[in-house]
Every structure is written in structure tokens, then in C-alpha cells.
Image (cartoon, rainbow, N blue to C red):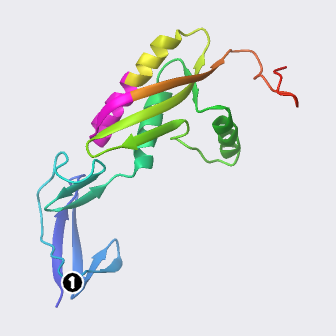
Amino acid sequence: MRTEFTFQVATRMVRTYRSLPGRMVFAGVHHRIRSGTTMAPTTDRVDGPTTGSPTTQVTTKGRTIIDDAVVAKVAGIAARDVPGVHALGGNAARAFGAIRDAIGSSALGQGVRVEVGETQAAVDVTIVVEYPVPMMEVASAVRAAVTTAVTDLVGLEVTEVNVAINDVEIPGLPAATEDAEGRVR
């Protein structure tokens, strides 16, 4: 016996899935349905979290899970867009980032750590600021941008955004390098 289910997803696009007894077809792949699992057609759109962890949205229509790395990427993108921020991350993170960039990859969450609770998130951001931009203003702008992005895009309340300024980028000067004895040349 074949059954068809029509689901409306967040993009308001309607998709129809066919099922066989004990199996469901999603994206052209047959998936086993656990015994006791029930599925019903829906045309409802869920707005906002209901129950579960902060990165898991559980409704009667399904579950949405957002990984902590995604929260870090959202925060990293928001921090990068702030005027006066030259880069994210400490020296080691930026060195690995240069290698990643050379092979065509990127780490949007570089220099960002998140701690996610049930309904809240705390974010730590390490940045390099451009000279001569006022550092306290850049830090405040990073806090505001990260808070807005995580709240609006992920749906978590941001309790704190700690900003660590790791370095200053001076235009026109080569980056400082350390010699074998640890002295800056």
C-alpha cells in the first residue's frame, strides 16, 4: 500500500513524499520508519521555538536541530562585517586560516566559541582590529552585531558576548614575525 504525504516546509514550498509500509521516501532515498512513529500531512508553518534545547525546535509537525558550529558561524559572519575588524582569531588560528585559504577552504567560525544552554547562548570572539579605529567602539559594535545575528537568525537569547582584541593591523606594515628566541623583529 502506497501513501502520499504533503509537507509544507519553512520556504513555503510544498513537497510530496511517497511511502511504502515501514518506509518513507525523502529526497529520493528510502528511509526506515521506526515502529510507533506516526506521520501526518501538514500545511502549518511553525514560527519560533516551542520545546526542547535551544538549538532543537520540537513541534507536533517535526524537529529542527541547529548545530553549535552553526551558531559560531553566524556569530563569526556578523563579527567580520563590523567596520574596523580586520580578522577573527588568535595568531595560531589565523596561521591555520591562511593555510585553509590557500587550498580554497574557509572557516567562518574561526576565532569564535559558543556555549549554548536551553534558551540562551554566550559567545566569545577573538578579533584583530584595524589601526587607528577606536578599539572600544569596535568591541561594542561586535557585541551588538553578534547579539542581533544570533537572536534573529538562530532564535537564542544572547547573555554575553566577550570580545578579546588579539592584535592590531597597521596598514602598510608587514606582519611582525618572531625569531627563534621568541623576540619580535
Is 154 on the left or on the right of 3, as rendered?
right
Location of residue 124 with respect to 102 vertically, above or below: above
Q: Tell me which corner region of the image, top left, top right, bottom left or bottom right, holds residue 110.
A: top right
Is 60 on the left or on the right of 129, as rendered?
left
Amino acid type at circle 1 is: Ser
> What is the magenta range?
144-160
Majority secondary structure of the magenta segment? Answer: helix
Location of residue 13 with respect to 95 vertically, above or below: below
Quadrant containing the N terminus is bottom left
- Please report the residue visible at 18 percent of the width from the left and 87 percent of the height from the top: 2
| x, y percent for residue 122 | 38, 35
Toward the viewer: 116 or 33?
A: 116
| Residue 71 visible at all | yes
Q: Mark 1 = which residue?
A: 35
Q: Is mark 1 on a helix, strand or loop?
A: loop
Quadrant containing the C terminus is top right
| Residue 77 visible at all | no
State yes or no: residue 57 in magenta: no
| x, y percent for residue 7 | 18, 65
- Please report the residue visible at 18 percent of the width from the left and 45 percent of the height from the top: 48
Q: Tell me which corner region of the image, top left, top right, bottom left or bottom right, holds residue 25.
A: bottom left
Is 83 on the left or on the right of 168, as rendered?
left
- Please report the residue visible at 62 percent of the width from the left and 32 percent of the height from the top: 90
| Residue that protrudes farthest toward the front in the picture | 181
Q: Tell me which corner region of the image, top left, top right, bottom left or bottom right, holds residue 24.
A: bottom left
| x, y percent for residue 132 | 60, 8
Q: Residues within 10 Å of mark 1 (few under 14, many from 20)?
A: few
